[in-house]
Amino acid sequence: MKSLLFFLLLLLLSLKVCCQPPASFVLVKHDTVILQATDCEWIIRTLVNNDSLSGHETGKSIPLVILEAIRGGRLKAIDPQTSQPIPANEIFTWRMPIDTVSRLDTSGNFVKYTAVQAERNAADFTRLRICQDWYFDPATATLQPLVKWIELIVEIRSSSGFFTGHMPFCRIYH
């Protein structure tokens, strides 16, 4: 667990690094890691200047913080299958089923049909996939990660609720 926490701290610190490494760095490895969202202790920092977020973020899951940041326009979500942007205001309902229900008045008489769309729950996102490049800095003899993108991975369930697998939901490029 301590090595995982150290890795996560290294990953968060890498977010401060600009998108291109200096020319003197040597690419060592392309790496993709899948993390269990519930197995990690998260230290949440803003992506802009690595400041601590306000207290209202404490205790929230990383998938929920990411989804709220997408909805708020601070992050841009991309569909990993089509490479098309996901509308920020639809992030909790994107690709969710829509059902038609009848509306009744107080005496039980039919009034009209209404479409109701299910909303996504942050608890459905059990994994994060992180793609990064590792660079060696000859001047300081250190390895430094550079995050390329992060994917939220959602659990897929059958109509009866049985778990069938995982699927990438959205990708966030850094």
Image: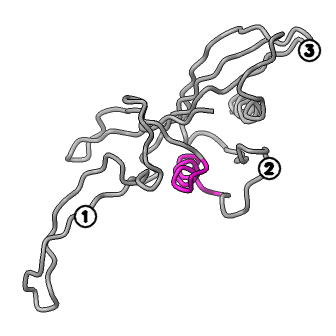
State yes or no: residue 64 in magenta.
Answer: yes
Tell which circle, 3 or 1, labels the residue nearer the N-terminal end: 1
Judging by the rendered image, the residue that carries numbered circle 3 is 140
Question: Is residue 65 left or right of 126 when viewed as pictured?
Answer: right
Q: CA distance from mark 2 to mark 3?
A: 26 Å
Question: On screen, 58 above or below 167?
Answer: below
Q: CA distance from mark 1 to mark 2?
A: 39 Å
Callout 1 secondary element: strand
Q: Quadrant of the C terminus?
A: top right
Callout 2 secondary element: loop
Callout 3 secondary element: loop
The kind of residue on which mark 2 rests is Asp
Judging by the rendered image, the residue that carries numbered circle 2 is 51
Tell which circle, 2 or 3, labels the residue nearer the N-terminal end: 2
The kind of residue on which mark 1 rests is Val
Report the predominant secondary structure element of the magenta stretch.
helix
Which disc, if any, is residue 116?
A: 1
Q: Position of residue 142 (x, y in %)?
A: 85, 15
Q: Quadrant of the N terminus?
A: top right
Q: Position of residue 136 (x, y in %)?
A: 79, 11
Residue sitting at x 66%, y 58%: 57
